[in-house]
């Protein structure tokens, strides 16, 4: 299965914790970017794809006519047969946007919320209100989207277990189909990194953050949201098909500045320099990219890392068939050590993270990449 990711990198304002490839919205730059992206799409060989994901940035920083035009061009090239998602910022949703997206083929909306608590929303540098989110969820239902997802964030400075629980409960009370709960990561060279350097006590340590993570798992599971990946919870039938393909080490094509692709065993990432991208795409030249061929042990290590993020973990027989590797034999020292420390568990046919291991997923999964 092939998934297509399209990066729309403009935002109405920049959040101080974010290190995505994003720029403040300026009409002329956004227009030039759209033309460059359209040129890149037009030169892409036609292919049959299953899923589409419009991410950012903030895709709905573009007006709905532009999004509809983009969806038409993408559908024409790739003929998507399954889920088509768009990330949206609730503040920017205008009347009529969601029905137009739906008519143009969007089946799933992912709403960037992070928190329903006014103090936390301010700390995160965002500007929505809980009422805005509620209106957008209603509008998505009225537009008959197949799935509605909310992103929430824990580990926000000033957050407490009580405020985190309130945000989770407000999301659950909206009866959305899918909730992503991400731990705040302080990335280098962001305003948050400077803040943490000045005031480390404002940020959560691992132990306190693990409590918030555990609270999310307990509350969401009790309300019928199955955890299917480290940060993702869904009602039955609403798992994100596009992201499941990533974790299954499936193929994907990334279009736009900074977008990543994985095809025929080669992983490549487009330049994150906006003007460099625009100039190359507009002129029909190859987009400057870094590429790496994943083979042998490296390819298997990547696949392990991705599969371990899912709650079902690595299916041992499937893995052997696909990569020719007996996981338990090959990674014996790593598996033994991580199992002894209570981070990994082995079932009859799978290897998977324990509940505690899920909180430390990046460290645990990384051990399989570095293992020689
Ligand atoms: S809206 Fe999203 S992509 Fe844009 S700056 Fe904020 S977190 Fe980053």
Image (spheres, rainbow, N blue to C red):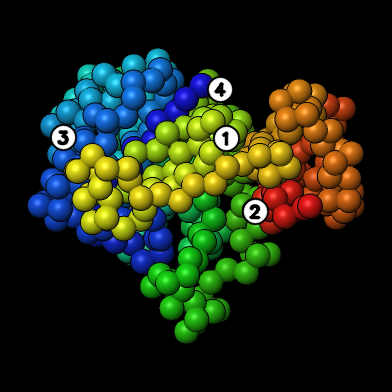
Residue at the extreme front: 285
Please name the residue shown 61% across and 61% down the image: 209
Q: Which residue is mark 4?
A: 236
Q: Which residue is mark 3?
A: 66
Q: In terms of sequence position, does the residue under pointer 1 or pointer 3 come before the other?
A: 3
| Dot in front, 1 or 2 | 1
| Distance between the alpha carbons at the discs numbered 1 and 3 | 33 Å
Please name the residue shown 45% across and 51% down the image: 290
Residue 31, placed above or below residue 241: below
Q: In terms of sequence position, does the residue under pointer 3 or pointer 4 come before the other?
A: 3
Could you say which is closer to the camera, residue 79 or residue 211?
A: 79
Crowding at dot 2, Cα within 10 Å, few <14 / some 14-19 / many 20+, comes out as: some
Q: In terms of sequence position, does the residue under pointer 1 or pointer 2 come before the other?
A: 1
Question: Answer yes or no: do the residues labelled 1 and 3 have beta carbons within 8 Å?
Answer: no
| Distance between the alpha carbons at the discs numbered 1 and 4 | 32 Å
State the SS at label 1.
loop
Q: Which residue is mark 2?
A: 362
Q: In terms of sequence position, does the residue under pointer 3 or pointer 2 come before the other?
A: 3
Quarter of the image where one finds residue 142 = top left
Q: Is mark 3 within 8 Å of ligand 1?
A: no
State the SS at label 3.
helix
| Distance between the alpha carbons at the discs numbered 2 and 4 | 26 Å
State the SS at label 4.
loop
Residue 70, placed above or below residue 364: above
| Dot in front, 3 or 4 | 3
């Amino acid at each position: 299965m092939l998934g297509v990711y399209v990066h729309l990198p403009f935002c109405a304002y920049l959040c101080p914790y974010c290190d995505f490839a994003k720029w403040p919205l300026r009409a002329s730059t956004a227009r030039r970017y759209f033309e460059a992206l359209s040129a890149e799409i037009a030169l892409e060989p036609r292919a049959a794809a299953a899923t589409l994901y419009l991410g950012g940035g903030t895709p709905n920083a573009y007006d709905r006519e532009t999004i509809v035009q983009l969806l038409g061009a993408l559908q024409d090239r790739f003929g998507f047969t399954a889920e088509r998602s768009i990330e949206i910022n609730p503040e920017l949703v205008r009347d009529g946007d969601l029905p137009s997206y739906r008519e143009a083929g969007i089946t799933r909306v992912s709403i960037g919320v992070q928190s329903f608590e006014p103090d936390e929303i301010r700390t995160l540098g965002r500007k929505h209100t809980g009422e805005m989110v509620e209106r957008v969820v209603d509008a998505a239902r009225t537009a008959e989207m197949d799935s509605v997802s909310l992103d929430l964030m824990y580990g926000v400075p000033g957050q407490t277990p009580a405020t985190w629980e309130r945000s989770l409960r407000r999301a659950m009370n909206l009866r959305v189909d899918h909730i992503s709960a991400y731990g705040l990561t302080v990335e280098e060279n962001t305003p948050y990194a400077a803040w943490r350097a000045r005031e480390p006590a404002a940020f959560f340590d691992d132990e306190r953050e693990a409590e918030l993570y555990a609270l999310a798992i307990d509350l969401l599971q009790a309300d019928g949201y199955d955890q299917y990946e480290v940060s993702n919870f869904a009602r039955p039938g609403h798992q994100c098909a596009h992201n499941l393909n990533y974790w299954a080490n499936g193929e994907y094509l990334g279009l736009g500045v900074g977008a990543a692709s994985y095809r025929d065993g080669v992983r490549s990432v487009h330049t994150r320099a906006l003007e460099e991208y625009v100039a190359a795409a507009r002129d029909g030249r190859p987009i400057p990219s870094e590429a790496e061929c994943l083979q042998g042990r490296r390819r298997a290590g990547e696949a392990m890392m991705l599969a371990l993020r899912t709650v079902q973990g690595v299916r041992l027989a499937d893995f052997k068939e696909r990569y020719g590797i007996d996981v338990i034999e090959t990674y014996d020292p790593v598996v033994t050590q991580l199992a002894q420390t209570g981070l990994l568990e082995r079932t009859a046919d799978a290897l998977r993270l324990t509940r505690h291991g899920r909180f430390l997923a990046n460290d645990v999964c990384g051990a399989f990449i570095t293992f020689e």
